[in-house]
């Protein structure tokens, strides 16, 4: 099954420069209010063609297992992938510098007007839009796994454990991560 606008390995662009990493993640940070993950996938896989859908899912899986913000970890991982420590620094700086300044400014404005019902409605609408973006990205990330029953079983087990059984994320990951590694390692080639 094909990924929406996904690229094949042959369509991957040349590795980005440090400047391209900085500017790409700067734009991502500037337009990614409410959650950058859906936009990160779109930029890295569909627009810039720096990664395949499969490579993005692989890097994100690693980044979700590490402590800290997923997209921050992803920016570092992508920068390291292409340009080493300097690339990681450029991608990270691009991702966080402008949004940090904007959020500090908006925080001051919000502190002043937080009880205004209009502002509360705006934030409720933004939360709904962010949830929709996250769901769409989850579906796009599942598409490369379609037809591969073993990874889908691990995804289903994780969903059942966290969403239905309400088990904490860390213990669930500590069980499922080694299990998925073992299953992938034992899988016949």
Image: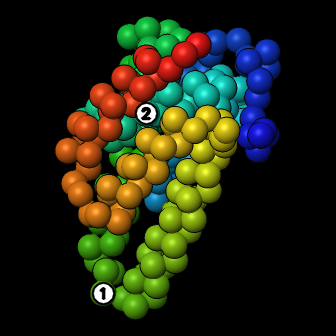
Residue 113 location (% of width, % of height): 33, 81
Residue 142 versus residue 82 in the image, above or below? below
Q: Secondary structure at mark 2?
A: helix
Relative placement, left or right, of 123 versus 140 is left
Q: Is residue 152 visible?
A: yes
First in sequence: mark 1 or mark 2? 2
Residue 84 versus residue 99 in the image, above or below? above
Relative placement, left or right, of 139 versus 35 is right
Residue 75 versus residue 3 in the image, above or below? above
Residue 144 location (% of width, % of height): 65, 36
Q: Residue furthest top?
A: 84
Residue at the disc numbered 2: 61
Gap between marks 1 and 2 measured at Cα: 39 Å
Residue 85 location (% of width, % of height): 38, 10
Of the 4 image quadrants, the one containing the N terminus is top right
Q: Residues within 10 Å of mark 2 (few under 14, many from 20)?
A: some
Residue 83 location (% of width, % of height): 50, 9
User: Which residue is at a point 52% across and 77% down the rendered structure image?
Assistant: 125
């Amino acid at each position: 099954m094909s990924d929406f606008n996904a690229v094949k390995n042959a369509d991957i662009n040349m590795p980005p420069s440090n400047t391209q990493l900085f500017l790409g993640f700067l734009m991502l940070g500037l337009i990614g209010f409410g959650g950058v993950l859906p936009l990160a996938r779109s930029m890295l896989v569909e627009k810039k063609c720096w990664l395949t859908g499969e490579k993005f899912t692989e890097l994100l899986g690693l980044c979700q297992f590490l402590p800290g913000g997923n997209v921050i970890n992803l920016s570092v991982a992508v920068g390291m992938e292409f340009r080493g420590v300097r690339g990681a620094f450029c991608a990270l700086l691009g991702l966080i510098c402008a949004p940090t300044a904007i959020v500090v400014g908006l925080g001051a404005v919000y502190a002043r007007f937080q009880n205004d019902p209009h502002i509360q409605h705006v934030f409720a609408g933004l939360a709904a839009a962010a949830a929709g973006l996250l769901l769409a990205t989850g579906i796009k990330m599942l598409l490369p796994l379609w037809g591969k029953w073993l990874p889908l079983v691990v995804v289903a087990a994780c969903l059942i454990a966290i969403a239905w059984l309400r088990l904490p994320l860390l213990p669930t990951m500590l069980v499922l991560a080694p299990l998925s590694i073992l299953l992938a390692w034992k899988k016949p080639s």
